[in-house]
Amino acid sequence: MNPGIAARKRFGQNFLHDPGVLARIVAAIAPKRDDPMLEIGPGLGALTQPLLERVEHLEVVELDRDLIPQLRALAPPDRLTVHAADALAFDFAARAPGPGRLRVVGNLPYNISTPLLFHLLDQSAAIRDMHFLLQKEVVERLVATPGSKRYGRLSVMVGARARAQQLFTVGPGAFRPAPKVESALVRIEPLPRPLVAPELADRFRKIVQQAFSNRRKTLRRALAGLLPPEAFAAAGVANGLRPEALDLEGFIRLAAQAPATTADAGPERTDPRGAP
């Protein structure tokens, strides 16, 4: 690959180059020869190359079309399939050889990380696990527990569908150009089935969204208009708690007490930085 290619800000590119970090990532993934593996945003191919040494066939999804010819030069088509596509619109399930088998990896730009996670979780029946380099703050929110500083909407919504584990941190010097923040590798494993029943999913999402949009208020005030006063006692939840003190199971119990007319919150939305 050509190391002189400049990263593009509009794609949120920070190319990983540190051999030690790359080796740790591959060791954490522990790919087997016959694993169906797909890499998102391979960039200059720094992670693609060691993955190709471990698996029989690798697929990659790259948005920057200027990188496509060089990626295709890394290996013949029977070893490497390059998709010139936007990962946010990509059909990952179609690339899985069977339920729960696809392994997904990538160094993800911060500006798409949260919507991409939910796009992947919508196809989680096809996915075995995901290993992503993300901004450390995002990973901390993924793995946060009730009462901690980072616990919030992302923690609850992802926790209802997957297990997340922070593996190790990566300093800015491992990337070109060096970002201004630390990154971390996270392992995300979809649950065999979501913890929230399908008929409660819309109410659950709306309750979590409104609660953390009013996180300085008590749950009774934060969820006014969504839940009747008696719903808290029925769910075994103290209405004087603040949202960050309530665990995932508590939010699920509240959703079960919400009126069926509770409006659908619509698809997951993020602010311009990707924060939920």
Image (cartoon, helix red, strand yellow):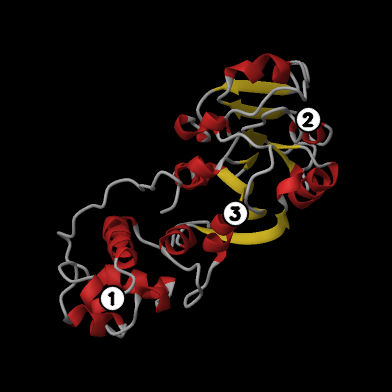
Indicate the secondary structure of the residue bearing disc 3: strand
The amino acid beneath tag 3 is: Ile
- Image disc number at residue 217: 1
Q: Nearer the viewer, mark 1 or mark 2?
A: 1
Q: Label 2 to label 3, Cα distance in Å?
A: 23 Å
User: Residue 18's x, y, as percent?
Assistant: 81, 42
Residue appearing at x 48%, y 62% in the figure: 159
Residue in front for this viewpoint, 238 or 213: 213
| Image depth: mark 2 or mark 3 in front | 3
Q: Please, what secondary structure does the residue beneath circle 2 have?
A: loop
* Disc 1 to disc 2, C-alpha distance: 53 Å
Give the mark, 1 or 3, whose residue is nearer the N terminus: 3
Which badge, 2 or 3, is on the more N-terminal residue? Answer: 2
Q: From where the camera sits, is residue 131 visible? A: no
| Amino acid of disc 2 | Glu
Give yes or no for contact between labels 1 and 2 (Cβ–Cβ under 8 Å): no
Q: Is residue 249 above or below residue 125?
A: below
Residue at 56% x, 35% y: name it: 12
The residue that label 2 is drawn on is 56
| Residue 78 higher or lower than 87, as above or below | above
Residue 128 screen position, x and y as percent: 61, 48
Q: Name the residue at 59% across, 54% down.
A: 188
* Residue type of the residue flagged with mark 1: Lys
Question: Which numbered tag is attached to residue 205?
Answer: none
Q: Is residue 225 left or right of residue 181?
A: left
Q: Quarter of the image holding residue 237?
A: bottom left
Q: How busy is the neighbourhood of tag 3: few (under 14 within 10 Å), some, or many (20 plus)? A: many
Choose mark 1 or mark 3, whichever is in front. Answer: 1
What number is the disc on residue 188?
3
